[in-house]
Image (tube, rainbow, N blue to C red):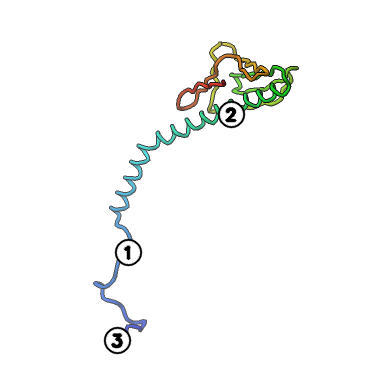
Protein backbone atom coordinates (compact mmCIF):
# COMPACT_ATOMS: atom_id res chain seq x y z
CA UNK A 1 0.00 0.00 0.00
CA UNK A 2 1.01 3.46 -0.71
CA UNK A 3 0.95 6.24 1.78
CA UNK A 4 -0.92 9.44 0.89
CA UNK A 5 1.91 11.53 2.28
CA UNK A 6 4.36 10.19 -0.26
CA UNK A 7 5.63 12.53 -2.93
CA UNK A 8 5.35 9.74 -5.50
CA UNK A 9 1.60 9.39 -5.17
CA UNK A 10 -0.55 10.88 -7.92
CA UNK A 11 -4.30 11.04 -7.58
CA UNK A 12 -6.43 9.38 -10.21
CA UNK A 13 -7.76 11.69 -12.96
CA UNK A 14 -11.31 11.44 -11.63
CA UNK A 15 -10.26 13.10 -8.34
CA UNK A 16 -8.48 16.10 -9.91
CA UNK A 17 -10.49 19.34 -9.74
CA UNK A 18 -10.00 21.71 -12.65
CA UNK A 19 -10.35 25.38 -11.66
CA UNK A 20 -11.02 28.30 -13.99
CA UNK A 21 -13.43 29.36 -16.71
CA UNK A 22 -13.97 27.98 -20.14
CA UNK A 23 -13.27 30.10 -23.20
CA UNK A 24 -16.97 30.36 -23.99
CA UNK A 25 -17.75 31.71 -20.51
CA UNK A 26 -15.03 34.36 -20.83
CA UNK A 27 -16.27 35.42 -24.29
CA UNK A 28 -19.88 35.70 -23.08
CA UNK A 29 -18.88 37.83 -20.08
CA UNK A 30 -16.72 40.10 -22.27
CA UNK A 31 -19.62 40.51 -24.73
CA UNK A 32 -21.97 41.49 -21.89
CA UNK A 33 -19.48 44.03 -20.55
CA UNK A 34 -19.00 45.52 -24.03
CA UNK A 35 -22.77 45.76 -24.56
CA UNK A 36 -23.28 47.43 -21.19
CA UNK A 37 -20.55 50.01 -21.85
CA UNK A 38 -21.91 50.70 -25.33
CA UNK A 39 -25.35 51.44 -23.95
CA UNK A 40 -24.26 53.31 -20.81
CA UNK A 41 -21.27 55.20 -22.26
CA UNK A 42 -23.17 58.14 -23.79
CA UNK A 43 -25.16 58.65 -20.60
CA UNK A 44 -22.02 58.64 -18.50
CA UNK A 45 -20.35 61.19 -20.81
CA UNK A 46 -23.50 63.35 -20.81
CA UNK A 47 -23.53 63.30 -17.02
CA UNK A 48 -19.94 64.53 -16.87
CA UNK A 49 -20.70 67.24 -19.46
CA UNK A 50 -23.70 68.46 -17.49
CA UNK A 51 -21.65 68.42 -14.29
CA UNK A 52 -18.99 70.56 -15.98
CA UNK A 53 -21.66 73.09 -17.05
CA UNK A 54 -23.07 73.22 -13.51
CA UNK A 55 -19.60 73.71 -12.01
CA UNK A 56 -18.86 76.54 -14.45
CA UNK A 57 -22.19 78.20 -13.64
CA UNK A 58 -21.38 77.93 -9.94
CA UNK A 59 -17.95 79.49 -10.58
CA UNK A 60 -19.63 82.46 -12.29
CA UNK A 61 -22.15 82.84 -9.46
CA UNK A 62 -19.32 82.77 -6.90
CA UNK A 63 -17.40 85.31 -8.96
CA UNK A 64 -20.39 87.68 -8.99
CA UNK A 65 -21.00 87.05 -5.29
CA UNK A 66 -17.41 88.12 -4.55
CA UNK A 67 -18.12 91.28 -6.55
CA UNK A 68 -21.27 91.89 -4.49
CA UNK A 69 -19.29 91.63 -1.27
CA UNK A 70 -16.66 94.06 -2.59
CA UNK A 71 -19.33 96.52 -3.79
CA UNK A 72 -21.13 96.45 -0.45
CA UNK A 73 -17.91 96.90 1.53
CA UNK A 74 -16.74 99.81 -0.62
CA UNK A 75 -20.28 101.21 -1.01
CA UNK A 76 -19.50 101.73 -4.71
CA UNK A 77 -20.33 100.01 -7.98
CA UNK A 78 -18.15 97.13 -9.15
CA UNK A 79 -18.17 95.64 -12.63
CA UNK A 80 -17.82 92.15 -14.05
CA UNK A 81 -16.57 92.08 -17.64
CA UNK A 82 -17.43 88.91 -19.51
CA UNK A 83 -15.33 88.07 -22.57
CA UNK A 84 -17.15 85.50 -24.70
CA UNK A 85 -14.20 85.14 -27.09
CA UNK A 86 -11.76 84.10 -24.36
CA UNK A 87 -14.45 82.54 -22.12
CA UNK A 88 -13.17 84.54 -19.19
CA UNK A 89 -14.39 87.06 -16.60
CA UNK A 90 -12.75 89.96 -14.84
CA UNK A 91 -13.93 91.76 -11.70
CA UNK A 92 -13.18 95.49 -11.85
CA UNK A 93 -13.19 97.92 -8.94
CA UNK A 94 -14.76 101.42 -9.20
CA UNK A 95 -11.49 102.74 -10.73
CA UNK A 96 -11.77 99.95 -13.36
CA UNK A 97 -8.69 98.11 -12.09
CA UNK A 98 -8.78 94.32 -12.31
CA UNK A 99 -9.38 92.81 -8.88
CA UNK A 100 -9.83 89.21 -9.95
CA UNK A 101 -9.82 87.25 -13.19
CA UNK A 102 -11.05 83.74 -14.01
CA UNK A 103 -11.20 81.56 -17.13
CA UNK A 104 -13.73 78.80 -17.72
CA UNK A 105 -12.76 75.29 -18.86
CA UNK A 106 -12.04 75.00 -22.59
CA UNK A 107 -15.07 72.76 -23.14
CA UNK A 108 -17.47 75.46 -21.86
CA UNK A 109 -18.38 78.55 -23.91
CA UNK A 110 -20.00 81.77 -22.73
CA UNK A 111 -22.95 82.77 -24.92
CA UNK A 112 -24.15 86.37 -24.80
CA UNK A 113 -27.46 87.66 -26.19
CA UNK A 114 -25.79 90.61 -27.86
CA UNK A 115 -23.42 90.28 -30.81
CA UNK A 116 -20.67 92.05 -28.90
CA UNK A 117 -17.78 89.82 -27.79
CA UNK A 118 -17.66 91.54 -24.37
CA UNK A 119 -20.45 92.27 -21.93
CA UNK A 120 -20.49 94.09 -18.62
CA UNK A 121 -22.45 93.38 -15.47
CA UNK A 122 -22.76 96.22 -12.99
CA UNK A 123 -23.02 95.38 -9.31
CA UNK A 124 -24.53 98.14 -7.19
CA UNK A 125 -23.62 98.66 -3.52
CA UNK A 126 -27.04 97.25 -2.60
CA UNK A 127 -26.09 93.98 -4.33
CA UNK A 128 -28.29 94.34 -7.41
CA UNK A 129 -26.72 92.98 -10.60
CA UNK A 130 -27.58 94.68 -13.90
CA UNK A 131 -26.60 93.37 -17.31
CA UNK A 132 -27.52 90.91 -19.99
CA UNK A 133 -28.25 87.26 -19.24
CA UNK A 134 -25.43 84.74 -19.44
CA UNK A 135 -25.73 81.29 -20.98
CA UNK A 136 -23.13 78.56 -21.04
CA UNK A 137 -22.76 76.02 -23.83
CA UNK A 138 -21.01 72.71 -23.34
CA UNK A 139 -20.89 69.28 -24.92
CA UNK A 140 -24.31 68.38 -23.55
CA UNK A 141 -26.28 71.56 -24.25
CA UNK A 142 -26.84 75.01 -22.81
CA UNK A 143 -27.47 76.37 -19.34
CA UNK A 144 -28.86 79.81 -18.48
CA UNK A 145 -27.38 81.40 -15.37
CA UNK A 146 -29.46 83.47 -12.99
CA UNK A 147 -27.45 85.95 -10.95
CA UNK A 148 -30.11 87.53 -8.71
Name the residue that disc number 1 marks.
Answer: 19
* Whether residue 28 is situated above or below residue 144 in the rendered picture: below
Mark closer to the chain start, 1 or 2: 1
Label drawn at residue 53: none
Quarter of the image containing the N terminus? bottom left
Secondary structure at numbered mark 2:
helix
- Image coordinates of residue 88 in percent, x first then y, are 62, 23
**Left or right: where 10 falls relative to 125:** left
Q: Residue at x 45, y 27 (%)?
A: 140
* Whether residue 51 is situated above or below residue 146 in the rendered picture: below
**Left or right: where 88 falls relative to 31:** right
Q: Residue at x 61, y 14 (%)?
A: 130
Q: Residue at x 30, y 66 (%)?
A: 18
Q: Residue furthest bottom?
A: 1
Please say if the residues under marks 3 and 2 sit with CB atoms less than 8 Å apart.
no
* Whether residue 15 is situated above or below residue 124 in the rendered picture: below
Spatial CA span between label 1 and label 2: 55 Å
Amino acid sequence: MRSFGSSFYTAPASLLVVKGFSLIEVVVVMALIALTLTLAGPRIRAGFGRLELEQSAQAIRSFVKAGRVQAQRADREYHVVIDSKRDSMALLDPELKVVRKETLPSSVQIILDSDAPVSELTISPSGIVRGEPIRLRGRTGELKITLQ
